[in-house]
Image (spheres, coloured by chain):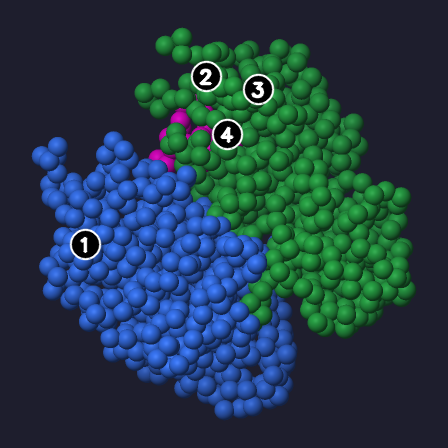
Chain colours: A blue, B green
Amino acid sequence: MNQEWDETVDILVAGSGIGGLGSAVIAAANGADVLVVEKAATLGGTTAKSAAYMWIPNNKYLRATGRTDPRDDALRYMAKLSRPRLYNPDHPTLGLPDWEYDGLTAFYDNASDAAEAYESLAGLKFGHAADFPDYYAHLPEDAAPTGRVLFPEESEGGPSGGSILIETLARACERANVPIRTDSRVVELIQDATGAIIGAVVNSAGRTARIRTRRGVICATGGFTQDPELRLRFLDHSYVGGCAARTNTGDLLAIARDVGADLANLNVGMRAPMVLERLKKDPAAVRGSFMIPGDSMIIVNRFGKRVISEKMPYHDFARVFFDWDSQRGTYPNNPLIAIWDEPARRFGGEGFGNPIPPQGEDDYWVIKADSLTDLEKKIAERLETLREYTGPVELDNDFGTTLTETVNRWTQMATDGVDRDFGRGSTPIEQALSAYFGVGDGPNPMMAPLADHGPYYATILGPALIDTAGGPRVDKNCQVVRPDSTPIPGLYAVGNCAATPSGEAYWAGGHTIGFIQCSAYLAARHVTQN
Amino acid sequence: MNQEWDETVDILVAGSGIGGLGSAVIAAANGADVLVVEKAATLGGTTAKSAAYMWIPNNKYLRATGRTDPRDDALRYMAKLSRPRLYNPDHPTLGLPDWEYDGLTAFYDNASDAAEAYESLAGLKFGHAADFPDYYAHLPEDAAPTGRVLFPEESEGGPSGGSILIETLARACERANVPIRTDSRVVELIQDATGAIIGAVVNSAGRTARIRTRRGVICATGGFTQDPELRLRFLDHSYVGGCAARTNTGDLLAIARDVGADLANLNVGMRAPMVLERLKKDPAAVRGSFMIPGDSMIIVNRFGKRVISEKMPYHDFARVFFDWDSQRGTYPNNPLIAIWDEPARRFGGEGFGNPIPPQGEDDYWVIKADSLTDLEKKIAERLETLREYTGPVELDNDFGTTLTETVNRWTQMATDGVDRDFGRGSTPIEQALSAYFGVGDGPNPMMAPLADHGPYYATILGPALIDTAGGPRVDKNCQVVRPDSTPIPGLYAVGNCAATPSGEAYWAGGHTIGFIQCSAYLAARHVTQN
């Protein structure tokens, strides 16, 4: 049989984000001969675009501050948000499907060990966001409302965390003699007569090779954000696209199906609002608008109404795009329009998808006008250029009148310092997310009246994904399982290409990468020790 | 090879709803030797529970009244509601994926012929709901806002339509010598070396038989409403269950996957609110609450607030259960509570899931009290018994106070005849759906003040499904296709077991069965003529 193979390794890793490079580093440190293939021309996948916050319950930095993060409480917090309708604090699995509960417990039990492994094996240095709150820090189930978030120290918590993380892991791979081949992707898995995975067909820049794997294949290839048809067929809602790596087209779904994997949670993704013109012009570099700064900025729908607290965490914010108006037969909040004034420009900045550009920088996505009346006209014109993302929607005929009423009401509420409609700034996370680019100084630092004269600014936002989170179901070792829950020997799935056990939740900043760094550790440990 | 087979037929039909029996009648009339197998002990599947309204664009009864239903307008109406964000009236497929557009055109082009086929071949007699409006009759895209709905004449438009339809089709099968075997289900499809379907393994009351099919297998086995795990993994939201036949556990998903079918639109279902205690006590007989009668009945969430027009069509009404409150970390509108007064009891009745029982009948799901204060206490107690469906939710501490404010505001608006919050009764369909059990006589017949004294009544509603609408993707002949869009010869899927081309839409009363009766006709025609 050997003559059929072009190459033999212990472990083939597909993907070079935290899931792929993280697995590779751990597996190599455990003595395995590892090869990493990456579909794109560059390393890092979606991780490289992120800030690489990692939400790690019961991490050693939290413990070092004298705080505790008890297991039962942490699991309750996670489970309640993952499956709100099924959650049952008195049930052995808290009301969750067994495999989801197992995934959450494996995460709690190993996430901190995993992070420490990257420190010791890859030389990664963490900073601790000691005071950064969870996204539902105000819920009674949250016994450790701050202190769970780590980030690559060198980034100081800024947007460069992901590229620093990837560089650190790539250097560790180099030290461990783990080759990383770009422009290379797994196109098929190879099974033996028992169904075990014994290798993969890899296409490298057009040439195909059969690579034998003595121990296994770890897939960490990302979700299906960049495949419009898969989004439409499987996700909960209709998204405009997202900030996942452009190569995240869900390749693993068909490959895994062909080897008998059970697919699950194809309906969930991590959401964020996104500046549509940035998506249109630069779909590879665009980021979700993870922080909506500005004390005076308001966000309205095309009927001129505010519909949400502008400071709500992105995963929840983006739900409001999907409110349906049966009587009008339309989604009234899709798209939304952010409107700000001259004073709000001081909150401009790079990174985290800030809709307000830094002063003096390219601002092609910003609509400018001297009056609100003029702004309305220009928004209407700009909307016509975005129909690919919005459908044939137009500003309501009464937009201007309603916007004036909205601004007047906003001014009154901002003067009082209380958002009586949507409670803007009333939770710890709304305050924290807004603070990165600075806050105002009124009675509520999240609120200020919109200036009574121009210039005014606007940009158009649509519902986007960070990435999807469904795919082959995995067990607590990240082994892909069949419909009967038996593992497919030799096959692992890590990260956004796998079915998440976190359901509909987005627990905190670092929800995604915190979980994936642990999955990578679990998969690498299992494949090298079994 | 023949000795491997236990039996040979031209066509095996799985399922005995309108999709199965409809296909069988047409195929038999075209000269085929047909066998129908039904998983349940009784005939009719979900169809038998329905009123069998059929939405049939450009039907002959509509035309006979002198009205027109032009193809381009009808397709625009369907497409806009199926894929609101993608809809583009200037695009060759109106912005839809090709296969969805093809499915809609096949429906428009054949739906009326199909209905006429059941008239001539099965002796079905139709009544015409000449004045019943589409669910978005008020949209400019609706060029035939009334007149598209037919129903079995004998039912007079009442809830018995489905059972009459099934009896009519079953008699036609008998006349055509088409056997119908209950307690019998397809457990596997059999392929030849080319992948074509040449038979099926059928389990009949525990005994397995291999049935050879000379022409094909038509699957009309319903959706996956009754499988909680599949609902969780694939649907857009978390439903409590639904009124589909209890045997609708999505059996075809795994069977079709195993023969290489492409799966699509697993995220969509047809929604309705449902009385939770009826679901709990009698999950086989329960229906969605398709009509919410009563001029004085209001529906509030557990914070005591109205959140929707109570008269909104069920598919859209049920979306409101899924509004998420990030700041509270909960679904505030799930469940909802319908509250009515003594005068509203005159709107009680059987059928269409009316939450108000007929007077003198069993009313175990109704909470009764002499005052609103007492009602609150009893609702709180009853909620505790429904946690299997609601999760651990409780009435808000301020429920009573807020409810009083809500009732006061409602009284004022009802006196004025205008629902300034949710536009209750402002569309043709809201008026029509409410009218079946009678309407009031104030300035707005959909609105009346809640009586200022008890007794008061309440019941608890949750988000349910009529059925799901995803599964193997099909072409315009209802042939199941592979990922590359080539058909799998000999395999057809019809109805809720197949991927619907109608996306997120529910165009009108009869949306589901109107479409399925046409699919059954198309599948039967193709399998007998090719």
Q: Quadrant of residue B392?
A: bottom right
Mark 2 or mark 4, whichever is nearer to me: 2
| Mark 3: few/some/many CA within 10 Å (<14, 14-19, 20+) | many
Cβ–Cβ below 8 Å for labels 1 and 2?
no
Q: Is residue B438 left or right of residue A179?
A: right
Q: Label 3's element?
A: strand
Please state which of residues A193 and B327 is positioned toward the viewer in this rendering.
Answer: A193
| Mark 1: few/some/many CA within 10 Å (<14, 14-19, 20+) | many
User: Where does label 2 land, which residue?
Assistant: B210
Q: CA distance from mark 1 to mark 4?
A: 42 Å
Q: Residue at x 26, y 44 (%)?
A: A490
Q: Is residue B198 left or right of residue A526?
A: right
Q: CA distance from mark 3 to mark 1?
A: 53 Å
- Which range of residues does the magenta coloring cover? B472-494
Cβ–Cβ below 8 Å for labels 1 and 4?
no
Check disc 4 and give the amino acid type.
Answer: Ala
Mark 2 or 4 closer to N-term?
A: 2
Chain letter of the residue carrying label 1: A
User: Where does label 4 land, which residue?
Assistant: B493
Q: CA distance from mark 1 to mark 2?
A: 47 Å
Mark 1 or mark 4, whichever is nearer to me: 1
Cβ–Cβ below 8 Å for labels 4 and 3?
no
Q: CA distance from mark 2 to mark 4?
A: 20 Å
User: Where does label 1 land, which residue?
Assistant: A36
Q: Is residue A106 visible?
A: yes
Check disc 2 and give the amino acid type.
Answer: Arg
Q: Residue at x 76, y 36 (%)?
A: B159
